[in-house]
Amino acid sequence: MKLIVNADDFGFSKAVNYGIIEAYKTGVVRSTTIMAGMPAFDHAVELLKENQGLGCGVHLTLSAYKPVLKTHKTIVDEEGNFYRKLLTEQDLNKIDLNEVFEEFCAQIEKVKSRGINITHLDSHHHVHTFEILKPVIEKILKKYNLPIRGGLGYELDYNKVVAFEGAFYDEAISVKSFEKIIEKNYELVEVMSHPAYVDLFLLKNSSYNLKRLEELEVLTSQELKNLLKENNIELINYRDI
C-alpha cells in the first residue's frame, strides 16, 4: 500500500509552516499544499527550498484571508477578503464562476512563479468537491493536467483523481485512525492532515487551532512509524505516483 500523508495549509502562518516542516523532517508527512494568498506564503517558499524532498501542491483557496487577484466582486466582502466560510452549495450559488476560475489560476501561477514544481491540487474547506464548482475544476484540470485529491461530490472523467481519507481529524486524531485506513487495503490513498505549531494569527483566523498540535504529536510519533513499517506501508508524495 502506498500512502500520501498530506499537510494542508502550508503558508497559513509561520507557526503552521514550522509544524509542517517538523512533521516532514521527523514524522510521516511527505506532501503538503500551499496557500498562495496567505501571509506566510513567502516564508513557506523559503522553507521548501531547504526541504526539497517535501512534495508541494496548491491548496486552492476561496474561504480564507485574501485572494491573489484584486478585481473580484462576488467572491469577496467589502474589505476585499474572501468570505470566511463557504460550506454549502447555497453559499457558492451566488458567486461568479469565472471569478473563481481566474482566482484559482492566479493562485497556481503564483506558486509556479516561485519555482515550485507543483505536484497536485486540493482545496481549503474542500470547496473543489462541491458540484457547483465542477465546471471550474474541469477547466483547471484541462489547463494544468495535475493530480487532484478525491472526495468529490460529483463524477469526473479524469484519471488523476487520488483516493482520499479525511478520517485523521479533530476527535479522530490518533494512531487508531491510521489502523482503520490500513484495514481498507487501498493500493494508493491520501490522508489529509493539519500539523502545526500555534501562533496568534492561527488562533485568530482558524477555529481548528490547538488540535493541530495533537496532529503534530501523532504524525511524529514512533508508534505511528512502527505501525506503518509493520504493515509495509510505503510513504510517498504525489511526485511518486
Image (cartoon, helix red, strand yellow):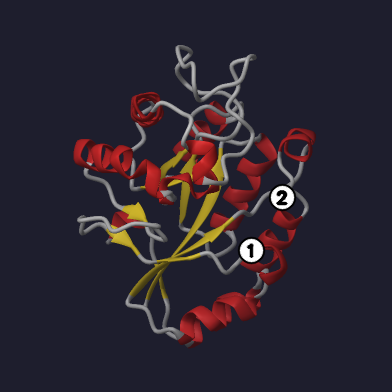
Q: Is residue 51 visible?
A: no
Which residue is pictured at 33% across the width and 62% down the height?
Answer: 162
Q: Disc 1 marks which residue? A: 169
Residue 162 vs residue 213, the one in the foreground: 162
For this view, does 14 lie left or right of residue 44?
right
Q: Is residue 74 visible?
A: yes
Q: Which mark is residue 127?
A: none
For this view, does 182 lie left or right of residue 223?
left
Q: How many marks?
A: 2
Q: Quadrant of the N terminus?
A: bottom left
Q: Which mark is residue 208?
A: 2
Q: Amino acid at mark 2?
A: Tyr
Say above or below: 50 vs 77. below
Say above or below: 83 vs 68. below
Which residue is pictured at 73% across the width and 39% down the height?
Answer: 202
Which residue is pictured at 26% across the width and 43% down the height?
Answer: 138
Which residue is pictured at 80% across the width and 35% down the height?
Answer: 200
Coordinates of residue 236 in the picture (x, y in percent): 38, 64
Distance from disc 2 to disc 1, alpha carbons, whole Å, reads 10 Å
Identify the image quadrant of residue 109: top left
Residue 25 vs residue 239, the one in the foreground: 239
Q: Residue furthest top?
A: 71
Instruction: Tell me the crowding category of disc 2: few under 14, some 14 to 19, or many 20 or more residues within 10 angstroms, Cα based.
Output: few
Identify the image quadrant of residue 85: top right
